[in-house]
Structures are given as structure tokens and as C-alpha cells.
Amino acid sequence: MFQEYDVIVVGAGHAGCEAAAAAANMGSKTLLITMNMQMIGQMSCNPAMGGVAKGQIVREIDAMGGYSGIVSDKTMIQFRMLNLSKGPAMWSPRTQNDRMMFAHEWRMMLEQTPNLDFWQEMVSELLIEEGKIAGVITSMGIKIKSKSVVLTNGTFLNGIIHIGEKQIGGGRAGESAAKGITEQLVSIGFESGRMKTGTPPRIDGRSLDYSKMEVQEGDKDIVGFSFKNIAKPEKQRCCWVTYTNKEVHDLLRTGFDQSPMYSGRIQGLGPRYCPSIEDKIDRFAEKERHQIFVEPEGWNTVEIYVNGFSTSLPEDVQYKALCKIPGFEKAKMFRPGYAIEYDYFPPTQLNYSLETKLVKNLFFAGQINGTTGYEEAAGQGLISGINAHNAAYDKEFFTLGRNEAYIGVLIDDLITKGTEEPYRMFTSRAEYRILLRQDNADVRLTEKSFKIGLAKEDRLRRVETKNTDVAHLTKFIKDTSVLPEEVNGLLQEKGTALLNQKVKLDKLVLRPQLTINEIGEKVESLKEELIKYDKESIESTEIHIKYEGYLEKEMELVDKMSRLEQVKLIDKIDYMSIQSLSMEARTKLTKIKPETLGQASRISGVSPADISVLMIYVGR
């Protein structure tokens, strides 16, 4: 019935979809197995993509030829570029999306991807032969052979849904949990743990009074995620902001004795940076109110996502508390919020390629690795799909460094430091964030992806044109002079020092009060030059000129650190026998088995003195 596949991907969430698309687009005969074909690419929680640091990840996925950015742009109902008041390293794109259109678009794109087949069923066991993956066994006992397998099980591994004192087996509302895989992996030596996440109630938007809320509109200038020219919506839907209050908090507290978190029924840790509403009012008891974002679920639905009100309290407590929020007095609930507890595998059991250390050609991506968020999952899915293809064809694994991508930071953090709570990406996690901006993801990554056979030639040509345009415009600005009388009116208006002599244009661009476009309105030669370039190239030129000094310093730091990354550590070093290392370092190094001296230096508990000892040991 089934031929042998190159790659099997288990699970069709954000990680699974990107993994399957990447492997298939690189030429692998790929099978995507999901428990429900109607739920491919589901937004299980909030109907939004991107945000701080997450938006950078989506742009990186797109730059490499992944699908998340395109799907997000085609289904957006609102776009905002966050943190525009800060420096460009912090700018982060975010879309509000139509939930139903998003899943539909994902399925359509996957069905149009060559080399990709589908099968609807649960995978209950892995075929492992002599320490190497050989395929999967489904719940009906069907054996499907493959050269590599990617597990992207999300919250389905032994998932339990909690609503107050009720417990329901399931991986998502209305869907059953997946059983068998955790038990098999633990039996062969894998370490597993439990985590939890939650989701808020869904509300009938017709029952809300928006006049009591603050409106939140989208940007007039829609940038989007994809570096391809995807058509942008002509109109956008509004979101709203309201707040909890003391009465809401007091009502929520009445249900704490029935809360699965406080009674100990949930063992797994929840996400620190996206806590439940009961967690917020317990941890931040001094706060009198918390923000609630009122987000529409799509163009043609009245369903509302209550962002900021994630909860697992009893449904009657949820409802009573909701009705005390301004604008929610007559709210009608579609379904209550709930928490879900599930199995994960500490990611220190993986290599940089996301291949497991115990089983060759078996890859993990997404929440199975202890992460939270669509974007983090999709980024891992892309890398695991690339490397599952490479494993099937005995090619060298593809990895990204911390200085190359947020995806590189994400994977390095996971496999080096591990995580005991759901991991979420922030700009603060990236030490080279001035280099890892959302605007230059294509410049950083498209050529790398093209070389391994994923990104197509049209993307590469577009990046080459952008690089040429930025170089030409930068040269023009650095070579062209401006007279005081041309710009002093603008300088006075902007509250910056006037010119008393002729200067080069780049000296003006360096001033934080001025933009290239504003200067171009006053300087005729620049105005004529700017007509030749698109908005993206002008923005990249401005960032390059304004931040040139910072970029050079960051590149010097990258160069210094890369020397440690180049020192490879062989897998068979007996760290316990190196007496000069601290005992903590010996224990951590033995467990994690770092691939390079650079990775070893980032392991918690390994000191600079330990790194010096290792440098001597490996002959450096």
C-alpha cells in the first residue's frame, strides 16, 4: 500500500507543516501524517503571527523559502510593526489573522507542493532498527518505512485538558491525545517531562460593548512578512483593549480552590511570559488591573479571542469574572478557556540539526522540545525538515549560528541550556540583535538556503538586486554634498543643529531626528535618486548608514566568538577524567556533549576557567 518514503513528518501543526514543505521542496518523497486532515495548520491559540522577536523568526522562515510568511500575509486582517519608537533591531512585524483562512491556505499550499503525500491516522510507535529510524507504525498497525522521521506532536503526547476539576484526555479541544510514542522513547533511554499551556475563552463579539474599550487599529503602511510581493488587504479589522479590575480579580480568586494549578493536579510548568489570568493576579497581587486584548478571529465571524485571559478555572467562575470586565457585561461565551498538560523531551537530547542523540535520523521540532509559540515551532520545523532530507540523502547537516538568525539562537539555547518551562523567544535572548533585524533576514539567509536547494532562484535574484540598490544608494549619499540653504529650514523644524557650511548627505542621515525621505523632500538631487529605489532598499540604506558603527562593533564581536565555534569537540571526550575541570562542568559537559568549544562556553555551570582547560586539552 505504501512505498518507502525519504521523510515522514508526524503532526501537521506549524512545525510539521514547515518540516514537510521543506523536505518535499528539497526533493524528498515526503509523507505528512496527521490525526485529522481538517486541522492542518491550525491556530490552536491566538489568531496572530509574529510579535517581538517572533516576527523576526517568521521573516527568517520566509527568507529561506518556508511558507509561514506567505500564509500569514494572505490571511491577515490587521498588520502592525511593533516597537517603531525604538531602534530597528527591535522592530517586529505582527499580523492578526483569519483563523479559518489561515488553516485553509496552509492546506492548499501543502497540497500544491510536489513530492508531498498525506495520511490521516495516529502514529503509535516508531520503527527503530539498530539505533536508526526505519519508519513508523500507525494505530491500525500499518508499517510505513522511511529513511528519516520528524516528530512534531505539539501538545498531543498524553495530553490532558483541564477545566476546573474536570480532566479530559485530548491534545486540543475536541481532539484525542496521542499515546504510545512517549512510552517507547522512554523505554530506550530518552528523558521526558510534562509541560502545560493554556488558552482563553472564546466570546460572541455581538454581545460586547466596544464603546467601553480603546480601539487598536492597524498600520496604514502594511509591510507584511514575506519578501515576495504578496497582495496586501485594502482594509483592516480593528482590535480593542480593555482592562480587568479588582472585582474581576476577587471573583477569579473564588475558584482558586478548584484550579488544577493550585490543587496540584497539573504537574507541568506553564509559560512564564504568557501566564494564565489566575497566575497574574497571584504573582502580581499589587497590580489593580491587567490588559485584555479583544481580537477578532477573522473577516466573516463574530468569534472573539480574549487575549490576556488564559485560564483553567471552572467555566462558571470564568464567565462571572469576564462579565465584570468593561465592555463584557453582557458577554456570551462560545467555549471556556482551558489548560492542557502534555509530554515533552528536554532538548539537550538533540544535536544542532535537531536530530536526537540516541536515535539516528530521528528529529524533534516544536512543543515536543519544550517551546511555546507558532513561530518558534515553525522555525524548528523548517530546520528539522531540511535536515531530515539531508539525512535521507547522506548529506551534511544544515545549521544556523547565533550570529546568523534568531532561529540559530533558539536552537542553540534549547540544545545547550535546555528548558524546564515553555521557551519563548525575545530580542533580549540574541546578543547580536543589531545584525539579526527583521528587514535584513533575506540578506542573511536566502543565499544560504538557495545553496542547499530550498530557496528558489527568484528569491536569490531579488536579494542580489536589493544588495546592489543599497550599495548604489549608500555611495550616492556618502558622495553627495548638501548646502545649508537647502536643509536649514528642515533642521530648524526638527530641532537639530543648523549647517553653516556644505556637508555630505550621510552626515545628515546620521542625525536621529532625520530620515532619508525627509531630506529628499528638500534636496532635489537626492529626491531624483530616491525615485530609482523601492521602500525596502531605502529603509535598509538608512539603517546601514545610521548604525554603521554599531554594526562594525558587532561584527568584530562575532569574529572573536567564531574562533571558539571553529574548535570542534569530538563526541568521545571523557570529561569525567579531566580533573582540572570543575565537577559541575564535567557533569554538564558529559550530559550535553557540546559540538564546539563555543557551545561549551554557553552551558550553564561551565566557567571561563573550564573553557581554558578545554582549550589546552584540545591543543589550542
Image (cartoon, rainbow, N blue to C red):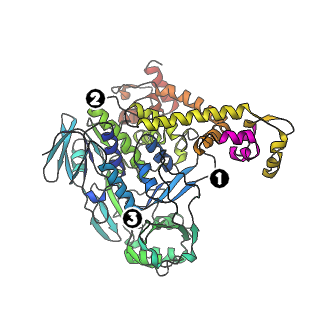
- Which SS class for mark 2? loop
Q: Closer to the camera, 596 or 475? A: 475
Q: Amino acid at mark 3?
A: Met
Residue 367 in the magenta stretch? The answer is no
Q: Which residue is mark 2?
A: 394
- Between residue 59 and residue 90, name the one nearer to us: 59
Q: Which one is closest to the eye, mark 1 or mark 3?
A: 1
Q: Which residue sits furthest top?
A: 619
Give the residue drawn at x 47%, y 24%: 613
Q: Earlier in the sequence, mark 1 or mark 3?
A: 1
The CA distance from mark 2 to mark 3 is 46 Å
| Numbered range of the magenta stretch | 507-530
The residue pinned by badge 3 equals 261
Crowd around label 2: few <14 · some 14–19 · many ≥20 (10 Å): few
User: Residue 470 placed where, x, y %?
Assistant: 60, 35
Residue 384: percent from left, percent from top: 34, 40
Residue tagged 1: 85
